[in-house]
Amino acid sequence: MSSNTLGIGLSLLGGVLVGNCMLPLRRIRTWPWECSWLIFSIVSLVVVPCALAWLTLPHWPALYLSVSASEMLPPFLFGIGWGIAQVLFGLAVVRLGMALGFTLVVGLGTVFGTLIPFFARHEASLMSRDSLMLLSGCILMIFGVGLSGWAGKLREAPGQMQKEKNYGGGLLIAVISGVLSSMLNLSFSFGQPLTQAALRHGATPSLAVLAVWPVALAGGLLPNLAYTLYLLGRNRSWNKLRSVYPDFFLSLLMGLLWIFAVAIYGLATYQLGRLGDSAGWAIYQITMVLTACAAGVLSGEWKKASKHSIGVFSLGILTLAVAITMAASSTH
């Protein structure tokens, strides 16, 4: 298997995992959202990233001593931005509904996460075949996600539509969340000094990227933990944590699915070569959307949908499939 094929396969696998990582949340029995999110955040943003780095990187965490503060700061700050996006995403969905909120946040996150590293690091090759293929795939992705979101809106019953007064604020929150959500990829793309430090200390090239995640996700932990602790205090739901089974294990599974998806994506970018951090992100995000759509179909969300909404939804899926093919082709 070629390095390129392996990278595409890993990006697809990561997208499938992250597209399904919230499914355990549907089976939570007694815990409120903040209890599950507390366990999810600790597992996915602290425990597993540090454990993976400790197991795979020689001299971790001492290797960070060879990196200046100015080199450590970008991935950490980008991580904070991504963490804020996580909090705002929930607010956007409440105000706009899942279809429109998800479309805006994921669409903008994919576009900014793909294009910013591309223009920052590959500007000289802007007019190459691979670059134009990636940009075309990105445009198709925007169109496909938009069609999926429109189909979801058409599927909703009139009584589920959001009140007008919520729309403007919800739209602003969704746009901010979408832009900031791209920062997870930016923390990786601009965390190369940490990867280089791991290589200098003897890390395997394909695994050196794991040095970035403990720093970036520590930044992401701060907003998530702050908001979760606020809800735990406001709702007085600390006592719910005493009931462990099965909600703790479902929250744990949710965290494991998410962080392993992110780790797999990081490994994929190494295999994808020059455009790995841009094309890989596009493949990863589009696969996530397709997986979430498939999960919705399998769970019966579209059983009573109109033919018109199903037609728009199918066109959106087809467009996303073409977009992911073009993004994969740009890595050759």
Image (tube, rainbow, N blue to C red):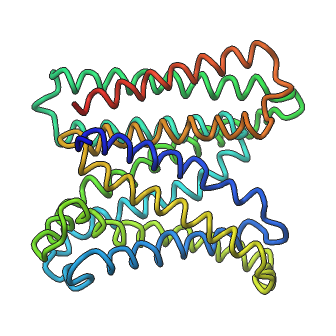
Q: Residue at x 77, y 73 (%)?
A: 246
> Residue 307: where, in percent of width, then height?
78, 13
The residue positioned 65% from the left and 42% from the top of the image is 169
Give the left or right position of residue 272, taking residue 172 as reference.
left
Residue 327 as seen in the image, left or right of residue 86: left
Nearer to us in this view, 280 or 145:
280
Q: Residue furthest right?
A: 159
Q: Quadrant of the C terminus?
A: top left
User: Who is closer to the viewer here, 10 or 217?
Assistant: 10
Q: Position of residue 40 (x, y in %)?
A: 60, 69
Q: Which corner quadrant of the image does residue 252 belong to? A: bottom right
- Residues 291 and 309: in front is 291
* Residue occupying the point 27% across, 68% down: 73
Residue 326 position, x and y percent, is 35, 24
Find residue 43 and report its horizontal and vertical position in percent. 54, 74
Q: Quadrant of residue 234?
A: bottom right
Q: Is residue 230 above or below residue 166?
A: below
